[in-house]
Structure formats: C-alpha cells, structure tokens
Amino acid sequence: MTRFVAPDPWHALRGFTRARIALGRTGHGLPTDALLAFELSHAKARDAVHQPFEIEPLRAALNAEGLATLDAHSAAADRAQYLRRPDLGRRLSRESRAALEQARADAPELTFVVADGLSAFAVAHHALPVLVAARAKLSGWRIGPVVLARQARVALGDEIGEVLGAAIVAVLIGERPGLSSPDSLGIYLTYGPRVGRTDAERNCISNVRPEGLGYEHAAHKLHYLLTQAKRLSLTGVALKDESDVLDAPGVALASERP
C-alpha cells in the first residue's frame, strides 16, 4: 500500500483467497490499481462469453490422443441467439441430430460431450487434460467418440446421449465466468440420458482448473461418480460424491472390492 491508500486491518487474509477483499481505500473510493484490476477481470469475463469455440485445434489434439470425435450444433443459430434463447441451446439442430443418428454404431457405456457453454476459454484450456486423465482411470469402459458441441447448454448432452444410445453422458462445459475465474470448466453426468431430464438427475463437478479443482482430482471424482452411476443405474440427488473417502489407505470402490 502507498501512503495515499488507507489499508484494511484484515489485509493479511488476502493471502488465503482470490476474492476481492481488504483492497483498502482512497478517500471514499477504491485504489486505482484495484479498480483497474476489477475492470480487467470484468473484460475477461465478457470475452469468455463471446469467444468462439475453436474446435479444430481441440479435435487435432484429441485425435493425437487416439480419441475419435463427432460434431454437434444446438438449435441456436449463433451466439446472439444462444444468449437470448437458452432453450435452443438445449436441443440439437435438425441437421446435427440427423448426422448423429447416421453416425450411431454400437451403444457406448459412456459418451463425453465437450461443449462451449458460457466460456469457450475453459474448454480450450482444460478439456483435453481432463479427458486424458479420466480415460486413464476408465480401463474396460466402452467409450464412444467425443462429441464437440457448439452453442451448447448442459442439457444438450441428454439429447446427444439419447441419439447415440449411451448409458451415461458426461458433459464438459464452460461455466458462467466469474470475476476471478473466466475459464472454469464444469462436468455434468447423467445416467440414462434423454430429452427432458432435469438438473436433479445429474451430478456436477465444478470449478475444474489449476487454480480450483485440479485435473487429477477432477478425474478422481469423475471416476468415482461414473463407477457408482454404472453400479446403481442412477445419477443426481440420489448419488452422493464420497470420492474423497477413497483417499484413505485401504479404501476401494464397491466395484473393486472382492
């Protein structure tokens, strides 16, 4: 703090959080550096919402990891319509539905959907490492091609999973940007995906990014929830995330116990 800024007595707490606390004051206002930092974060959040989903670099990276891909587009024609009409982002366009029906082969146990959501930055930065870490834990699972979805809301995964005949769909999607997290990734799991599923029938792993929930920890939680969803034939409020218990020595998933 400079001599022009009156410090807050609890300034030391800033070492424990990225939240904007104890910024001090100059007169009745914020210090200039704090105000400029806020405006920069606000601009990054706005940019995250409008940033186009650059699919081709992600497709190339997934293919290099041996992961096949399919494309999908919601019924929202463009970003402006997507933001005005959330309902259109939850359903496939007629052309995408027809293409996925044509591409359907053997029904997979699990289909991953990578969707832009409200932050294409999140998908570009975090989807690949999460998928690689998760796949390493899912030996023996029949996993379908990764579906890359534009102008997508979470529920679009329900229709994609239904069309492809997947038992479970996992949607990796850019979450609503915050002023300290413009690139936060969310993972939503739905057992028996179909149009009309509600949020109460999903499980969510949120804030996946190096500054939040790290890739390996997210993959650990994802593996736990997928294994239990498969065992119990359900997701949602009836499926509790007890994955952290598995960090204790000698604890194994129910499906791994003798």
Image (cartoon, rainbow, N blue to C red):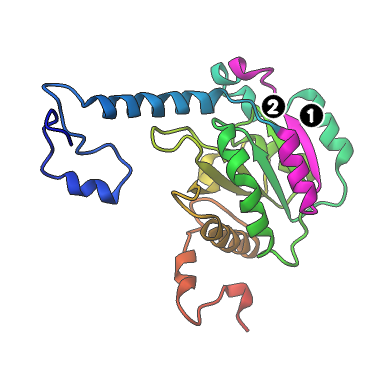
Q: Are marks 2 and 1 in contact (CB under 8 Å)?
A: yes
Q: Is residue 162 visible?
A: no
Residue type at mark 1? Ser
Where is residue 207? Give x, y as percent: 47, 46
At 21% across and 35% down in the image, what residue appears? 23
Q: Quadrant of the N terminus?
A: top left
Where is residue 90? Give x, y as percent: 63, 29
Q: Of the two numbered discs 2 and 1 on the same chain, state the one appearing first in sequence.
A: 2
Alpha-carbon distance for marks 2 and 1? 8 Å
Left or right: residue 161 versus residue 22 is right
**Which label sits on residue 71?**
none
**Residue 233 placement: quadrant:** bottom right
Left or right: residue 60 versus residue 174 is right
Check disc 2 and report the residue beneath it: 74
Q: Is residue 56 magenta?
A: yes
Residue type at mark 2? Ser
Q: Residues within 10 Å of mark 1 (few under 14, many from 20)?
A: some
Check disc 1 and report the residue beneath it: 96
Where is residue 234? Give x, y as percent: 60, 55
How many numbered marks, from 0 up? 2
Q: Residues within 10 Å of mark 2 (few under 14, many from 20)?
A: many
Residue range of the region highlighted in magenta in the rendering: 55-81
